[in-house]
Amino acid sequence: MRNSETPKTYRVKSFGCQMNVYDGERMAEMLNDKGLSPAAEGDDADLVVLNTCHIREKAAEKVYSDIGRLTKGDKNPMIAVAGCVAQAEGEEIMARAPAVGMVVGPQAYHRLPDMLDRAVKGERGTDTDMPANAKFDVLPQRRRVGPSAFLTVQEGCDKFCTYCVVPYTRGAEISRPFTDLVTEADRLVANGAREITLLGQNVNAWSGEDATGHEIGLDGLIRALAALPDLERIRYTTSHPNDMSEGLIAAHGEVDKLMPYLHLPVQSGSDRILKAMNRSHTTQSYLKLLDRFRKVRPDIALSGDFIVGFPGETGKDFEQTLKLVDAVGYAQAYSFKYSPRPGTPAASMDNAVPKEVMDERLQRLQAALNRDQLAFNQRSQGQNCDVLVERQGKLPGQWLGKSPWLQSVFFTGEAAIGDMVRVHLAQAGPNSLRGELKQTVAA
Ligand code: SAH
Ligand code: SF4
Ligand code: F3S
């Protein structure tokens, strides 16, 4: 490990889910407060934080190869490993990779600045404690953000799906207090956010007390944030079918700022497999839930997650997944091959599905999902919609933003990052739409 002078520049590399992106931003804010500055693009950083994900296989291998690349030749940056691999395999990383000076888990990263002080003196350190909510009490205030910002409101998982590492790496479910969240959202908006995505491993399990001491759920929090005048859009992810409330469904019909989009993972269309996964919902209960959303918000875009090749999944089970996909008509979805994770119950189940079968099933599933995604985009063609401008496109005068349904929209015309503009959607592709600027809705 490097143990000389205090690093001056840093880079945080976040992998995995949006919560890791949020955590990466918070670590960057702490390092800024400590006087470090972000390394310029293309430059080597004095301190590299690898903010890792453990959800699927080869997570640890990837960390070791990143460390190898960072220390190639005579390069010698200080390296911190954070995130879910740090939580799950921190001790092994410390033992195997002498170049790593700090290992810090997702619930302990507020201690990174202190660990850095010790690392500068040559003391390596591992912190994988899980003090619930502690980090949020001491993290610095939010700084300048883009037009679309993340806000972690709920963290951890008590569901223990048999394939999943998250309950072990993120810990038990906790909800951040209402007032803290309103304050952080306020800061985000003051710093340029026009859209906030509320994050949680089971975000719809969020609960708290509002300013008057009333018990509220996620819908109550959404309604309170909708009152922030300069906030234009609210989203939330990821929800679990079993934590869905009447109030949250109703909010989709009543709160204009709540975008017509729902990411609701289902994983499989076979009840037998859902049971083996410990999902505790059925295909029928899932479909019924979606119907309730569609009733209050007929244009809602639906998204989901799927796993193919869970142990024991037969061809018949898989056909049921395809049937479910046909029944829903997703606007967008993620699909993965099952990956056995050490320490999870599914990892020791019999009847593993051969790799070639998994490959073939994934291909068929993705073909069906792509077909539906294109069809969804084609239905938007010819309409006008509001687009929040997030960045410049590659072509001159081109901008990229998101529609209310989270579609990427490219358009050309007079605009700026953070504008809400009205765009005529002229042409639909599988992953994006192209349009023409009609007018700026609000500056
Ligand atoms: N909390 C969220 C998702 C967390 S992980 C939820 O329950 O919906 C994101 C996605 O990764 C999961 O929805 C699942 O589809 C996938 N995933 C998780 N563990 C996996 C594994 N062992 N193999 C393959 N995919 C997995
Ligand atoms: Fe993992 Fe299931 Fe929890 Fe989602 S609900 S994080 S898939 S254990
Ligand atoms: Fe990965 Fe951890 Fe997120 S395992 S998906 S970074 S919660």
Image (cartoon, rainbow, N blue to C red):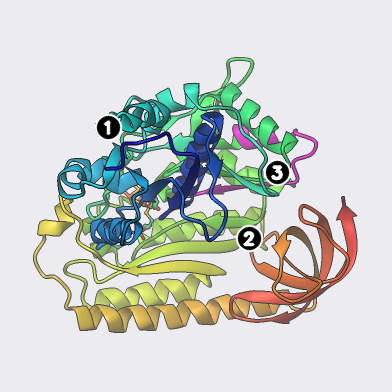
Q: Which residue is mark 3?
A: 193
Q: CA distance from mark 2 to mark 1?
A: 54 Å
Which disc, if any, is residue 167?
none
Q: Which residue is mark 2?
A: 300
- Give the x, y percent position of residue 277: 25, 56
**Which residue extends farthest top?**
212
- Nearer the observer, disc 2 or disc 1? 1
Which residue occupies the foreground of this view, 128 or 42? 42
Instruction: Please say if 24 is above or below 162.
Output: above
Q: Secondary structure at mark 3?
A: loop
Q: Amino acid at mark 3?
A: Ala
Range shown magenta: 221-239
Residue displayed at 57% across by 69% down: 331
Q: Which residue is mark 1?
A: 122
Q: CA distance from mark 2 to mark 3?
A: 23 Å
Mark 2: C-beta under 8 Å from nearest atom of ligand 1: no
